[in-house]
Image: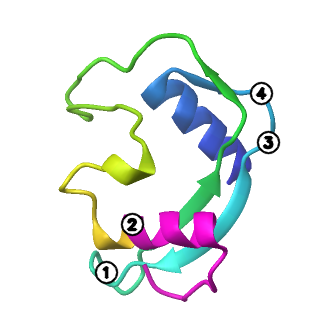
């Protein structure tokens, strides 16, 4: 998974890791299916060679302060961010 996250960041966001990504957790996402899992990594050290341009797969990609996340940020994503920032216990599901 560590190799996959580095590859995806490079290909999908023009991001190169400058230190290893740290696995935060693996979560069951029943909203997608009973077999879908989401791996969440914490990335604190990276460079971005250029902003991500829109394409057929990603309409928009930007960095946001935690206090100003987009309205459409999913509840699951908001919970994962809170766990990382607050250090709360990890649930099994997304």
Label 3 element class: loop
Q: Answer yes or no: do the residues labelled 1 and 4 have beta carbons within 8 Å?
A: no
Q: Residue 47, image x and y in percent?
A: 64, 20
Q: Answer yes or no: do the residues labelled 2 and 4 have beta carbons within 8 Å?
A: no
Q: Answer yes or no: do the residues labelled 2 and 3 have beta carbons within 8 Å?
A: no
Q: What whole-number distance in Å separates the C-alpha atoms at marks 2 and 4? A: 25 Å
Instruction: Give whichever of discs 1 and 4 has the lower sequence position.
Output: 4
In the rendering, which numbered label is found on residue 20? 3
53 and 3: which one is in front?
A: 53
Check disc 2 and report the residue beneath it.
78
Q: What whole-number distance in Å separates the C-alpha atoms at marks 1 and 2? A: 20 Å
Check disc 4 and report the residue beneath it.
18
- Name the front one of labels 2 and 3: 2
Residue 1 location, quadrant = bottom right
Instruction: Give whichever of discs 1 and 3 has the lower sequence position.
Output: 3
Quadrant in the picture for the C terminus = bottom left
Instruction: Give whichever of discs 1 and 2 has the lower sequence position.
Output: 1
Q: What whole-number distance in Å separates the C-alpha atoms at marks 2 and 3? A: 23 Å
Above or below — where is 56 with respect to 1? above
- Name the front one of labels 1 and 3: 3
Check disc 1 and report the residue beneath it.
33
Q: What whole-number distance in Å separates the C-alpha atoms at marks 3 and 4? A: 7 Å
Q: Which residues are magenta?
A: 77-94
- Name the front one of labels 2 and 4: 2
Label 2 element class: helix
Kindly identify the residue that appears in the image at 65 percent across and 52 percent down: 42
Query: Which class describes the residues within 10 Å of circle 4: few (<14), some (14-19), or many (20+)?
Result: few
51 vs 44, left or right, is left
């Amino acid at each position: 998974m560590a190799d996959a996250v580095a590859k995806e960041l490079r290909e999908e966001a023009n991001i190169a890791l400058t230190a290893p990504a740290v696995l935060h957790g693996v979560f069951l996402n029943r909203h997608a299916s009973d077999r879908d899992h989401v791996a969440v990594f914490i990335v604190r050290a990276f460079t971005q060679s250029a902003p991500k341009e829109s394409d057929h797969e990603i309409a928009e990609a930007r960095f946001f302060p935690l206090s100003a996340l987009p309205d459409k940020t999913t509840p699951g994503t908001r919970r994962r961010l809170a766990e990382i920032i607050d250090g709360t216990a990890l649930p099994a599901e997304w």
